[in-house]
Structure formats: C-alpha cells, structure tokens
Amino acid sequence: MGLHSPNPEQLSPGKKLWVLLTGIRNPKPQNGGKPSFPVQTVRIASPNGALEAWYARPDSGRARGTVALFHGYTSSKSHLTHEAGYFRRLGYNVLLVDQAGNGNSAGFETTVGYREADDVVAAVHYLRTRHPADSLILYGVSMGAVAILRAEAELGVRPSANILECPYGNMRQTAYNRFASMHLPGFPMADLLVFWGGVQNGFWAFGLNAERYASQIHTPTLLLWGTADPRVTRAETDTIFSNLAGPKVRNDFTGVGHEPYWRRYSAAWEQQIGAFLSH
C-alpha cells in the first residue's frame, strides 16, 4: 500500500528534486464507499484482467440509454459517484468502471490511457451484449477520456456520444507539463521518462496522442476543460477540439484546475451535460 506522493504543485524545491531522483510513490488506488443509490457489482473480462464495475438503473421509468464512466489517473470508480448520480437523474443506466490497476480491478500498473483503451472496449462489449439497441454514452476524465479516444480511433468502439473532461494532448506534452508545474526544465528528463515508461510497459509512449486520435472521432462529443489546469494546456485542448471530426461542443470552466468541475460550477456543469444529451 503506502502513501501516494503529493501533487508536484504541493512540493518544496528539495522534495521536487527528491521525487525526480527516486520516483513517485503510486500505490494502487482504492475505492471509497459505494454510492448512495443501489448498485450491482459486476465483473468484466478485459485483456488487462478482470475489471470490477458498478451497474445501476435509474429510479423510475424506462432508461434513456446507458452512460459508462471511466476515471482518471490514480483514481477509481468511487470518485465518479456524483457524476453517475446526475446521469441517473437524467434517466440513464450507469456503469462505473475500475480500469485495470485501479480499485478492485486486476493488476497494479497503468499506461495512462493506452491499455486502458482495452478496458473501454471491454466495458462497451459488456453493455452492447446486454443492451444492443440502447444509446451508449462514454464519459471519461483525464486518462479515462484519452482511453475513450484511443478506443474509438484505433480499436473500433462506436458509442452514441462522448463526454470528455480534460483529456491531455499527448504523453510527451503531459510529461513536460508536469515538469513545468514543478518549475523545472523538461528537457531531457521528460523525454527520458516517457521513453522508459513506455519500454517498461511494452508500448511506444510517444505515440499516445489524443490530438491525433481526435481527428478520427466522428462521434458527437462534449469537451470540457478548466482554464487554470496546470496539467492540460489550452493549446492541447484547442488542438483536440479543432481535430474532432464530428459534431462537437466545448465549454471552459474559468479558474478551475485539474479537478471535478461540478464542485465549483455545479449548475453550469449540469446544464452543459443536460443540454448536450438532449440533442
């Protein structure tokens, strides 16, 4: 287990240097309590191992469709219970997924969106076999959003709509952003970290590129971003939005960082999502 290293923005200069020399502590993220609404715990087969998910129906009436929710880096499905609750109030079934290496799913490693795309495919297959005719919306935060984009661009997933919060542009830029948030030069360490991280996990990390994936996305997409996000830049967000090839809507939340937007802009967050889904 152990404790997770603090965010780089919270570290003193000496501790920043120590993290660079020794690496971050990243124990497997654990789930908190279950949501206030009733859920069924399900297991989903993925190439990355068995995934645990929570499935819930809306309280009343026939469901409008299903929303599958995918969390961010160093997180778990329990961090998306507020969002899932809102989708249920709109009349949707919800599936909250622990991606591999997180929560109660198999494994201890993360590839920050690359192999997590296989988990998106697995969750979509699980839902399509049970509700083949239903509308299917994919909701992802940060790493989860990038996993959705890769699942569509390279692995053939075809949802009805996407809602993406703060997807990063590409793995290399993300590493440079982390160094910038620590007020340290990125070159050459950021490139070395991306290279060796990919080698250790068996994939070409420089190819993990949501900006490129976006150009192959024809699914209607709502893109959300916070203007004070130190980990995802405006330039990255502009490029992703510009490259999206299908119907698209974007909203920026002023002064919000890499965090849930509903905490500071609850009404605006709900309005953006409700309006998008109504169309």
Image: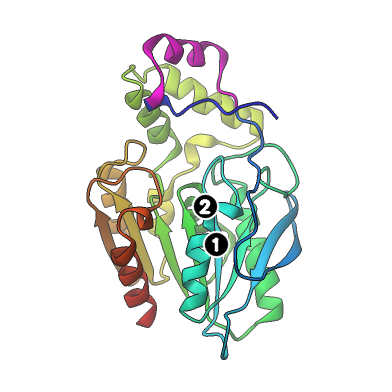
Q: Nearer the viewer, mark 2 or mark 1?
A: 1
Q: Could you give the CA–CA distance between mark 2 and mark 1, rounded to whole angstroms?
A: 8 Å
The image position of residue 216, as x and y in percent, is 42, 61
Relative placement, left or right, of 231 versus 76 is: left
Rendered image quadrant of residue 44: bottom right
Specify the segment rendered in magenta.
10-25
Q: Is residue 8 above or below residue 108?
A: above
> Residue pushed farthest left?
254
**Label 1: element kind:** strand
| Mark 1, other Cα within 10 Å: few <14 / some 14–19 / many ≥20 | many
Q: Is residue 69 above or below residue 189?
A: below
Main secondary structure along the magenta-highlighted residues = helix
Which residue is more in the foreground, 107 or 200? 107
Q: Position of 112 compared to 173: left or right? A: right
Residue 69: mark: 1
Residue at the disc numbered 2: 144
* Residue in the image at 41% along x and 41% along y: 170
**Disc on the earlier residue, 2 or 1:** 1
Point out residue 67 in the picture as x, y percentages from the top left corner: 54, 71
101 or 269, which is in the foreground?
A: 269
Relative to 194, 117 lies left or right = right
Q: Amino acid at mark 1?
A: Leu
Q: Quadrant of the C terminus?
A: bottom left
- Whether residues under marks 2 and 1 lie with C-beta atoms below 8 angstroms apart, the answer is yes
